[in-house]
Image (spheres, rainbow, N blue to C red):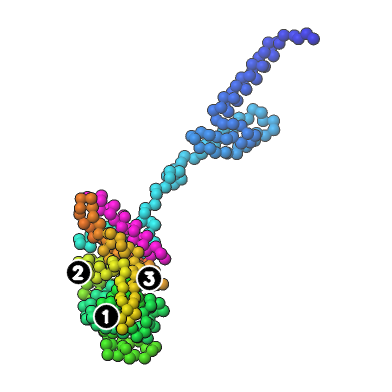
């Protein structure tokens, strides 16, 4: 079969078709890939798929709708990673304060004047009032009223007799509520607390008056007591007051702080009582930086803790730190205190 050479008209038609194909190819390479009714656009490094109208039948000459470029990213929709949360954001305590016991400088605080339950931090005040108003050798007998204060008496038995100085360790190390209330009973009702019938609590009013007088004398205007153990909801304070109290402890009650930093204390069996081992429940006892303090916990107060640490810089400067956490989540007061300690020493190191 013999083919005739293309006419001039046919040559022009072929060249025109090739030109159209070339234009389409350049468009696709520059703007995207045609997919039926979609164009996948990859300009500016942002993948986006935008639906475009399909040309109506018979409209061959209608230009293709160009892809819609993504809107310019603004600060409101920034893809820049968020700034990492502050370590302080992990602290569960409703209120806290960290400051220098010697100078009064505050390094960190949150809700420092917010009222909160004191719980067993109250026992530090109980100890101060007792040592200032009672004979350390005074013998105190365990009574039914004392044992009725709280179900867990840590093995203290009815009728046992202890010196006040021995009971200090049981109250401060074990946080024994029965002992704390017993001390207040023995002071307020010295002649009747032993003979008070079961089911009746001897008056503690005289001792409570001393505790409230102590807080007033220290300028703790938001601190108030209704019992000696901290079980009462009326035992309240705030972080600011307790920081001031921590300063007082550091400057005036080193011996008392020494008791609170004692791991354990044993009393041998005698004719007055059985042998007892008082074990400290404070999680920081034994820490080389820990000077002393007290834990507390009730349903209303949450978890509380007052702790005093001694931080020494590389240059040898001492920074005694009072750290108070109030209403921490269950089992979080130690973590809260540790995190505040680390943040405080970071501040101190930057200042030196």
Residue 302: image quadrant is bottom left
Query: What residue is shown with label 2?
Result: 252
Residue in the foreground of this view, choosing between 36 and 119: 119
Check residue 257 for magenta coloring: no
Where disc 2 sits, the SS reads helix
- 46 shown above or below 312: above
Q: Specify whether residue 346 is in view.
A: yes
Q: Earlier in the sequence, mark 1 or mark 3?
A: 1
Residue in the foreground of this view, choosing between 72 and 225: 225
Check residue 349 for magenta coloring: yes
Instruction: Return the x and y of residue 317 as percentages of the image width and height.
Output: 20, 54
The residue depicted at 67 percent of the width and 13 percent of the height is 11
Q: Magenta residues?
A: 328-352
- 185 shown above or below 169: below
Where disc 1 sits, the SS reads strand
Residue 175: image quadrant is bottom left
- 93 shown above or below 149: above
Please state, as top left, top right, bottom left or bottom right, where the N terminus lies in the image.
top right
- 156 shown above or below 109: below
Query: What residue is shown with label 1?
Result: 163
Instruction: Return the x and y of residue 88 as percentages of the image width and height.
Output: 36, 56
Query: What residue is shown with label 3?
Result: 297
Q: Which mark is residue 80?
A: none
Instruction: Return the x and y of residue 49 as percentages of the image width and height.
Output: 57, 38
Q: CA distance from mark 1 to mark 2?
A: 24 Å
């Amino acid at each position: 079969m013999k083919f005739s050479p293309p006419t001039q008209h046919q040559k022009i038609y072929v060249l025109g078709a090739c030109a159209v194909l070339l234009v389409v190819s350049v468009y696709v390479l520059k703007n995207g890939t045609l997919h039926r009714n979609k164009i996948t656009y990859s300009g500016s490094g942002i993948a986006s798929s935008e639906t475009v109208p399909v040309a109506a039948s018979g409209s061959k000459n209608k230009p293709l709708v160009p892809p819609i470029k993504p809107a310019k990213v603004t600060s409101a929709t920034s893809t820049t990673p968020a700034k990492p949360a502050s370590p302080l954001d992990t602290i569960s305590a409703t209120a806290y304060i960290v400051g220098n016991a010697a100078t009064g400088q505050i390094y960190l605080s949150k809700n420092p004047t917010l009222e909160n339950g004191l719980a067993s931090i109250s026992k530090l005040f109980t100890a101060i009032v007792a040592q200032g108003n009672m004979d350390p050798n005074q013998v105190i007998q365990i009574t039914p009223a004392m044992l009725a204060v709280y179900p867990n008496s840590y093995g203290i038995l009815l009728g046992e007799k202890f010196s006040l100085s021995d009971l200090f360790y049981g109250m401060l190390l074990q946080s024994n509520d029965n002992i704390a209330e017993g001390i207040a009973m023995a002071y307020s009702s010295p002649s009747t607390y032993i003979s008070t019938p079961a089911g009746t609590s001897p008056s503690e009013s005289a001792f409570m008056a001393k505790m409230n007088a102590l807080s007033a004398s220290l300028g703790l205007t938001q601190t108030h007591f209704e019992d000696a153990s901290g079980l009462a909801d009326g035992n309240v304070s705030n972080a600011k007051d307790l920081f001031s109290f921590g300063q007082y402890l550091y400057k005036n009650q080193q011996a008392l702080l020494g008791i609170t930093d004692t791991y354990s204390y044993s009393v041998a069996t005698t004719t007055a009582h059985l042998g007892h081992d008082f074990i400290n429940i404070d999680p920081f006892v034994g820490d080389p930086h820990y000077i002393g303090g007290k834990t507390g916990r009730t349903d209303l107060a949450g978890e509380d803790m007052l702790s005093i640490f001694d931080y020494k810089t590389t240059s040898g400067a001492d920074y005694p730190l009072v750290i108070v956490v109030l209403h921490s989540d269950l089992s979080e007061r130690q973590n809260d205190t540790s995190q505040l300690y680390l943040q405080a020493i970071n501040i101190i190191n930057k200042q030196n």
